[in-house]
Image (cartoon, helix red, strand yellow):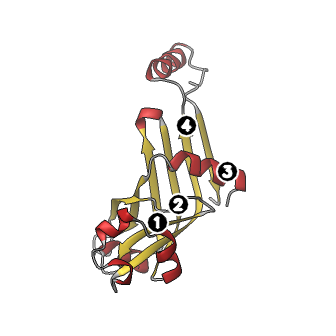
Amino acid sequence: MSSPEHKKLIWELIKPIKVGMLVTKTTEDSGGMRGRPMSLVQDAYDGTLFFYTSKSDAKAFEIVNDTDVCLTFSNPKDNVYVSLTGKGCVTQNKELIDRYWNPWVAAWFENGKDDPDLAMLEIKISKGEHWDSKNNTLVQIFELAKATIKPATTPNLGKHEKFGKE
């Protein structure tokens, strides 16, 4: 888990990105992984992320079958990358559905909040890491070149931090 300050930092990194890739283990015999884009709907982060879905969608079945999930957020323009790992569950909690309902979500669910197939994914984050480099590409190239010339030098490409249980 992370501190309230760290949760605030994670939210500041992922909120402007808005869409993350949710990775689940497929229910196919091959046992592969599958990622798909999911849009943030909440206005704060306390260690849990919520996403709308159809309970009949493959990702819902995959999460019921194996609760381990990974979420990744990427903003290459600003050199921000976040990877979050946690446990997912599928819920039809009306209070949650009402709390985060908005016109964007309504566009995906034509039968509205009362759609019997409407559900939410609740992802409780347990660990992750983030990379945040304010350096532009030219500075990063310089840092890499410097490290190549001086092998004992580690390039300073920005901030990288892990958190949570390993």
In the image, what residue type sits under mark 4? Asp
Q: Which of disc 2 and disc 4 is earlier in sequence?
A: 2
Q: Which of disc 3 and disc 1 is earlier in sequence?
A: 3
Q: Is residue 101 visible?
A: yes
The vertical placement of 81 against 21, above or below, is above
Spatial CA distance of label 4 from label 3 is: 14 Å
Question: In the image, is 108 to the left or to the right of 66?
Answer: left
Q: Residues within 10 Å of mark 3 (few under 14, many from 20)?
A: some
Spatial CA distance of label 2 from label 1 is: 6 Å
Give the numbered dot on residue 132. 4
> Residue 44's image quarter?
bottom right
Q: Which of disc 3 and disc 4 is earlier in sequence?
A: 3
Q: Residues within 10 Å of mark 4 (few under 14, many from 20)?
A: some
Q: Residue at position x 45%, y 53% from top?
A: 72
Q: Report which residue position mark 1 lands on.
A: 69
Q: Are marks 2 and 1 in contact (CB under 8 Å)?
A: yes
Q: Report which residue position mark 3 lands on.
A: 6
In the image, what residue type sits under mark 3? His
Q: Quadrant of the N terminus?
A: bottom right
Q: Report which residue position mark 2 lands on.
A: 85
Residue 89 image point, x, y percent? 48, 76
Q: Secondary structure at mark 2?
A: strand
In the image, what residue type sits under mark 1? Val
Question: In the image, is 63 to the left or to the right of 107?
Answer: right
